[in-house]
Image (cartoon, helix red, strand yellow):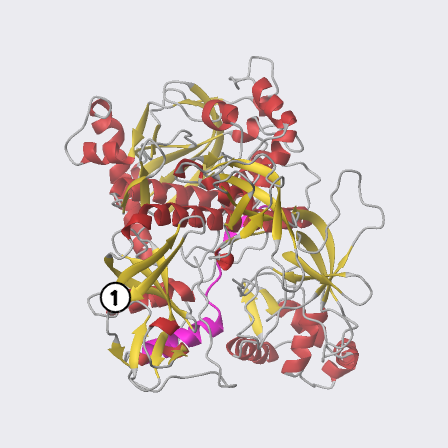
Amino acid sequence: MARKISNRQARIAAPGQSSSRAKIRKDPAVAAEGHLPSKEDILAFIADSPGKVGKREIARAFGIGGGQRVWLKHILRELEDEGALDRRGKTLNRSGSLPPVVVADITTRDRDGEFIALPTEWDDGDGENPAPRILVNLPRRPKQGQPVPGVGDRVLLRLEANRDRDSAGKRGPAYFGRVIKVLTKTRARLLGIFRADPDGEGGRLVPVDKKMLGREIAIRAGDGGGAVDGDLVSVSVARAGRFGESTAKVIERLGSLKSERAVSLVAIHTHDIPNEFSPAALREAEEAQPVTLATEGSRQEDRREDWRTLPLITIDPADAKDHDDAVHAARDTDPANDGGYVLTVAIADVAAYVRPGTALDKDALERGNSVYFPDRVVPMLPERISNDLGSLRPHEDRPALAVRIVIDIAGRKRRHSFHRIMMRSAAKLSYQQAQAAIDGTPDDTTAPLLEGVLRPLWDAYAALTDARDDREPLALDLPERKLILKPDGSIDRVIMPERLDAHRLIEECMILANVCAAETLEQAGSPLIFRTHDEPSVEKLRALAEVLASIGLKAPKSGALTPSLFNGILAHVENSPNRDFINEVVLRTQAQAEYSVDNYGHFGLNLRRYAHFTSPIRRYADLIVHRALIRALKLGGDGLPAHTTREELAEVAASISAAERRAMAAERETTDRLIAHYMADQIGASFTGRIAGVTRAGLFVRLADTGADGFIPASTLGTDFFRYDESQHALVGSRSRKMYRLGDSVEVRLMEAAPVAGALRFELLSSGGTARKAARTSRDGASRDSRRRRV
């Protein structure tokens, strides 16, 4: 699904501005004569400027000073309101342009045989705003061992705007792109499940792609490649003549799918998730030796502080195998901070084992993050590091990077400091175990820790809660589902885990530690990768206003855009029939979080500075932040290399952002396939659910009990013709005025389940509501699709 580039993401300016304007801008006589620039002049200046542009740069270029700066501020605000300009901190960007580093798919060749790529994330506005074309520049002499990209490949590109292109776009593509890295080599193959013919002669392929649901491809005798019934295979497809049948030939056997335990193999291979470490990385992991306290005579910067007597504890899911964060809290003895606390967050020192440029480092960067499936984990680091040397096991010496934070009685941070330490976890607790102890039922492990360790933590958490409430982060209600598997890998049941104060305690501690890391590195002037979350775009806010108007509510029109505005909307509908509907719409209004070297804050958390620091075992971004802290604070010789540039980190940020989205898609598809397996024997059964998505093609419904997602084709809704009403996120009958709207509760019957594709098809049993106004269509008369965003 195409998505729009982040509203405040750093952008290379769009081409197409006239050179005459550039000459006017650079002529100091213009400013001297008192001529102020037009909006077009300002936009052209931003478009043609290769570096960062802010109000200061614009004022200097046009000779604007004194009282005219107020005028400039007003004009820039108007450009923002009109959607022509985006602001990120003090940096201004032309709307609708691409960032300097982008993930793109090579889709075709031009007339000269050059590769043309399109950005993987772009909102085309239902065809009104097509994605900009990128001409891919290939090196004349590729480095040895470096893959050469081709059509169908996904690549990481560094962009340069095509400044010779005219405003009509008739002089070539919008951008030139230099290949930084080939992320995914196209296989020119198809993945599917091999089904053997009963007579043993050949078989057929059942594709795993939902787009090919219901289609099967014949595999002739001798082309099975040794596959047996139930194998996941990769095939090449031979296209037959115009009226002939296509056939497939097995190229590779990828594993057996006889049980649901292997269903994650489909997502791993579909999304090209690296699941085998290089021999060099495995060798480095096995040869790694435990880090110890520096001996006498070692360099001062390599010595660790001995914090092994501090009773830090880990609190994780009951089935967690790696433990990368530990916490401790105690009353602050400083009389000037009466009622305050000293909070300690210690994070596994993965940087001590994974050095820059090593095979371990290269494999970790390629993976970007660990991927969690219901039946397995594809880790970012080998088990020797993730589950052993780097894991904060109880009662074992472990290296850590710790931050000691002093908070006041209201939970506000007064100061903090980072330390490279040796620690020894006092206990490994589960969320449920820690919560039970606080609630009055401690066990043998938690009883000795209750008064001296757990209660101070909960008291500090109460203060942090006050600070969080004052900050007012986005308060969306987003329940998660968890699949409980049987020993054979099939689903036993689907649950919605309860959110405990123990979960929130760890979450608040980690958020505060991440803030400390970002503040420290920014103050030190160190390059780093921020965790950023853009504020909603102007287009999304306008759509939200239309939705609110359809139910008689008005969107706030004044004041700074903050999460509290959305919280007020959610609170207003909390006890109304529109609660679920508005929650879904507000969710879709939000941008997607990402990694960036430009700090434009985290809108959802309502934080100005935020960087991932607390999970270096499973996220490469955190490892970068650890190395940056080690270098900036002179905590050792294994920090971020001194020659690391901001441009290099921008490439890393784009790569790991793409890896994160890849992991999310793979995890979601695996859950869908497992649930489809689970429901395959319930054809004809009826269920209660809610409409979770509306398009011209039909309705997406999420079931209440399992969270299973299925589709209802618009053609099955009855004899009426249904149009998509964008303003109400609904399908509306042209004659009957029946309306099926996002968030509506519905009754459905399961008609079809395709476990391999993870697809369910429902029949609607509910009658639907009545539309309040005529269905609204786009200017050309065609209805518009909704596009779902995930925060």
Where 768 falls versus 761 (above or below)? below
| Residue nearest the observer in this picture, 111 or 401 | 111
Residue 548 included in the magenta stretch of the image? yes
Residue at the far front in the pictured view: 199
Residue bounds of the magenta highlight = 525-549
Residue 338 can be seen in this image: no
Position in image of residue 468 (x %, y %): 32, 52
For the C terminus, give its image quadrant: bottom left
Question: What is the secondary structure assignment of the residue under circle 1?
Answer: strand
Q: Residue 745 in magenta?
A: no
* Residue 282 visible somewhere in the drawing: yes
Tag 1: amino acid: Val
Q: From the top left corner, tell me how far across and down residue 601 is, in percent.
A: 49, 56
As rendered, which of 675 and 780 lies closer to the eye? 675
Above or below for 341 versus 159: above
The reply, left or right, for residue 454 in relation to residue 616 is left
Q: Which residue is mark 1?
A: 746
Q: Where does residue 592 sit, x and y in percent of width and height?
A: 48, 58
Mark 1 Cα within 10 Å, few/some/many (few <14, many 20+)?
A: many
Residue at image location 71% in from the left, 69% down from the top = 174
Report the side of 331 relative to 618 (left or right).
left
Q: Which residue is at 27% across, 63% downward?
A: 748
Q: Which residue occupies the foreground of this view, 181 or 703?
A: 703
> Which of the 4 image quadrants contains residue 429?
top left
Badge count: 1
